[in-house]
Amino acid sequence: MSNIQIPRGTQDILPGESEKWQWVEQIARELCTNYQYKEIRTPIFEHTELFQRGVGDSTDIVQKEMYTFKDRGDRSITLRPEGTASVARSFVENKMHGLPDQPVKLYYLGPMFRYERPQAGRFRQFVQFGVEALGSNDPAIDAEVISLAMNIYKKVGLKNIKLVINSLGDQDSRLAYREALVNHFKGSIHEFCSDCQNRLEQNPLRILDCKKDRDHDLMKTAPSILEYLNDSSKEYFQKVQTFLNGLGIPFEVDPNLVRGLDYYNHTAFEIMSNAEGFGAITTLCGGGRYNGLVEDLGGPETPGIGFAFSVERLLSAIEAEQLDIHFAKPLDCYLVGLGESAREKTLPLLQEMRMNGVAAETDYLDRKMKAQMKSANRLHARFVVILGDDEIEKGVALVKNMESGDQVEVSLSELVEHIRTA
């Protein structure tokens, strides 16, 4: 019988790597706390209808990439492919629109699932970090959300990043632009892929996102959304830019940047990596403002803005910039117990150390002292505590500083405090 292997498009994150994940996740969590975004945890699977309505029937995610199955009650269930729809569903279901403090500022972190072709930095199970601010139409919150995303990347040390922004305008502006796109593409839509042919009537903005036909001449001459913004949409976009300038955040305006879902409006943005060797797909993070999603899920009219990024992509960008990450807490103490009576004292001592904030380890293979000292070296222990029959009789332990080589006797009653404060 052959060995069972990991499913394609997934990965094991082993010790040595998992600490990097914890490090970047902790940075994101701490920044969210500073910005007053609170964590929300939603189910890993939801009713399929949520994503059909919340993500959109015309999207590649819904049409091609979802993990959907029937449960034992014959209900259609889908592993979540993204986080916004679940957050919006929870916002409506838990009546968060009635909370006294608005907007409601949330973040989430967890695995998402998409059946797509695995490639460098992309997986079928991936971890997504995302932020949603629901309940405010103020362009200042757009700038806040963008600054939070940018500052996560800066805090981990990335230098080669670029912010690109655009406006999709309000509903009237989008409708005018939609009509212009249909008129632009319809005469030659037969030259485009079948997906784009379907998108022409369903959602023509998504034609501009097509990877297959991106080099088609009509793509290069497509009208710009900025030409179709009405006065109020232009004013909104200008205010967002003013706030970003005030925050000292450099950006580029790219009129070809679109978010294809029907409920997106006004601000759209992406953060990209310019790091050499990062790969052809440079986008690290995508986000934008949306109206209509909460209403579509049965809630009151509620504007929102958010972003999401894959932790895998962030770690790939860190690797591409060859950043030196110092994340591991060193081992404070390796406890060497020599002889039976010493071994009986070892576990209680370890317990006391660990409960007092000291990272401590000992030997469980009954090895000689020399082998235990080698193990302490490999684990980069700051101190080795040696406990033998003689030491127990005297009520002391030998404490060796592994950096200086100095060795002192310390009373067992003072041992934990000595290691903790050294």
Image (spheres, rainbow, N blue to C red):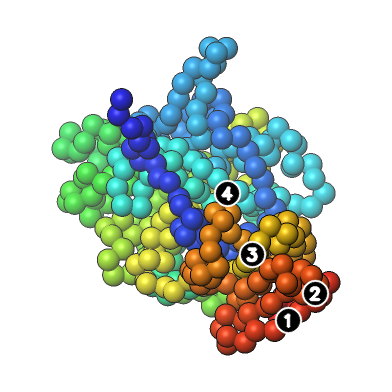
User: To which residue does mark 2 refer?
Assistant: 394
The CA span between labels 3 and 4 is 46 Å
| Kind of element beneath mark 2 | helix
| Marks 3 and 4, the one that precedes in the sequence | 4
Name the kind of residue labelled 2 in the image: Lys
User: Percent x, y for residue 349?
Assistant: 75, 62
Name the kind of residue labelled 1 in the image: Glu
Query: Dot 4: within a 10 Å radius of its alpha carbon, few (fewer than 14), some, or many (20 or more) residues?
Result: many
The CA span between labels 1 and 2 is 10 Å
The CA span between labels 3 and 1 is 16 Å
User: To which residue does mark 3 refer?
Assistant: 338
User: To which residue does mark 1 refer?
Assistant: 409
Which quadrant, please, contains the C terminus?
bottom right
Residue 408 shows up from this direction:
yes
The CA span between labels 4 and 2 is 52 Å
User: To which residue does mark 4 refer?
Assistant: 109
